[in-house]
Amino acid sequence: MSTSTRLQGRTALVTGASRGLGRAIAEALADAGAAVALVARDAERLATVAEGIRARGGRAEVFIANVSDEASVKGLAREVQSRFGDRLDILVNNAGINLRKPLVDFSLTEWRSVLDTNLTSVFLMCREFVPRMTGRGYGRILNLTSMLSHVSLPGRTAYSSSKTALLGLNRALALELAPEGITVVGISPGVCDTEINAPLMQNPELREQFRSRIPVGRFGQPSEIAALAVHLCLEESGFITGTDIVIDGGWTAQ
Ligand SMILES: NC(=O)c1ccc[n+]([C@@H]2O[C@H](COP(=O)([O-])OP(=O)(O)OC[C@H]3O[C@@H](n4cnc5c(N)ncnc54)[C@H](OP(=O)(O)O)[C@@H]3O)[C@@H](O)[C@H]2O)c1
């Protein structure tokens, strides 16, 4: 059985739900009672996530889409409408990638792939799904930003640019949607041990270098990011909008 009913009756869509933070967020929303549309490109992994949610008594449907591609996002919107329903309460734009190297080594294609996946995807998703969220006085849009929206590191020009630009999108969209009761909030995680960080995590020296820079002395857990996401979806979080919540073990306080 789902462990809570705090989001009973709500529908949610999570991009990048096949693994990492998106998976944890989707599972937590489902455990809180929401029906969840799971979106990513890896059908097999998504199916595993959906099976897990259903085994706990939750509702989950799998949708394959490339969120950086306009036609794919339009197709996703049609598919969600026919298999999941035409109303959406919660949209979590979580899918993201990172390419780490000096600016001078980026090809334009690589630069665009980071911007398209991390930033333009949020525009494409919101353009399709916001019209399905209006008119009911409640809605939640959570966009995964990053501690690198606030500080940066060498080799992160594309990633930091995309995630910092998202702060602006969040503010402007929050103002547009405030009269609808739809909040728009950024969640800025610090370093978590997920696949996006494989280049750091698989290098023992680099892993320790990063761990030792985190004041709490450990990496973030996907479940901690997911708990924040659930909290932001509650009715009583309706006054939190147009802002960004950093959850980074103290990294940006230094
Ligand atoms: N982990 C961290 O330390 C950290 C810190 C700050 C911010 N974040 C942000 O949090 C979000 C999730 O990160 P994560 O750690 O969970 O990364 P991850 O483990 O690499 O997962 C990324 C997810 O995004 C999906 N994805 C990537 N490109 C996609 C595309 N074009 N279309 C559809 N889905 C796509 C992937 O699924 P498929 O490959 O199956 O499509 C996967 O489910 C990202 O936006 C990331 O920037 C993470």
Image (cartoon, rainbow, N blue to C red):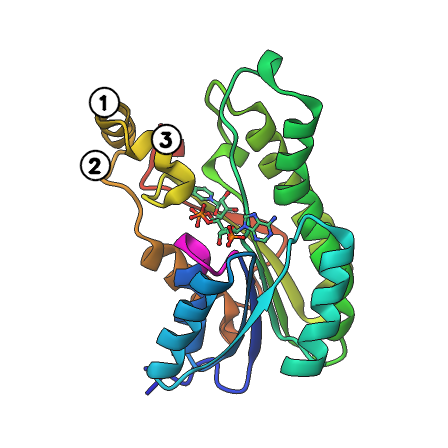
Residue 127 placed where, x, y %? 77, 59
Question: Disc 3 residue type?
Answer: Pro
Please tell me the numbered disc located at residue 205: 1
Residue 161 placed where, x, y %? 62, 30
Mark 3: give few (<14), some (14-19) or many (20+) Cα within 10 Å: few
* Separation of marks 1 and 2 at Cα, in angstroms: 15 Å
Q: Secondary structure at mark 3?
A: helix
Tell which circle, 1 or 3, labels the residue nearer the N-terminal end. 3
Q: Secondary structure at mark 2?
A: loop
Question: Disc 1 residue type?
Answer: Glu
As drawn, 162 above or below 194: above
Mark 1: give few (<14), some (14-19) or many (20+) Cα within 10 Å: few
Residue 45 shown in magenta: no
Q: Write down the quadrant of residue 218 in the picture.
A: top left
Question: Is the CB of mark 2 within 8 Å of ligand 1?
Answer: no
Give the residues in magenta. Answer: 16-22
Pair 1/2: label in front: 1
Q: Residue furthest front?
A: 44
223 horizontally vs 94: left or right: left
Pair 2/3: label in front: 3
Residue 157 placed where, x, y %? 58, 23
Kindly identify which residue carries mark 3: 199
* Separation of marks 1 and 3 at Cα, in angstroms: 11 Å
Question: Disc 2 residue type?
Answer: Gly
Front position in the image: 3 or 205: 205
